[in-house]
Image (spheres, rainbow, N blue to C red):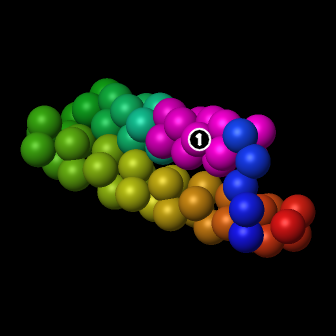
Amino acid sequence: MHLTMTTTALLALAFVVAVLVAVLAGSAAAYLARLDGATYPAAVTRGATAFAATLTLVAALTGAAAALVV
């Protein structure tokens, strides 16, 4: 498959948005865990879990959308 400059730019943008959404979800989860009284290590663990889960979900959805477009 030949990727044009536009396709490459859109893939890069999708990657950046996916990582940004995952970072925001992880940060929110860690913040809410800390507000709930969790220790710092427990809050970081919850944030990391939320980050990984969100990144996996967004990557799967992006892959499925790309397969439908191409």
Image: magenta residue range: 6-20
Observer-nearest of 67 and 56: 67
Observer-nearest of 19 and 35: 19
Residue at 88% in and 63% down: 69
The residue tagged 1 is: 12
Residue at 29% in and 50% down: 48
Residue 8 % position (x, y): 66, 45
Q: Answer with the quarter of the image where residue 65 lies.
A: bottom right
Q: Is residue 12 rendered to the left or right of residue 38? A: right
Residue 47 % position (x, y): 32, 45
Question: As shown in the figure, which amino acid type bears the numbered disc 1?
Answer: Ala
Residue at 79% in and 71% down: 67
Q: Is residue 64 magenta?
A: no
Quadrant, the N terminus:
bottom right
Quadrant, the C terminus:
bottom right
Residue 56 % position (x, y): 50, 63
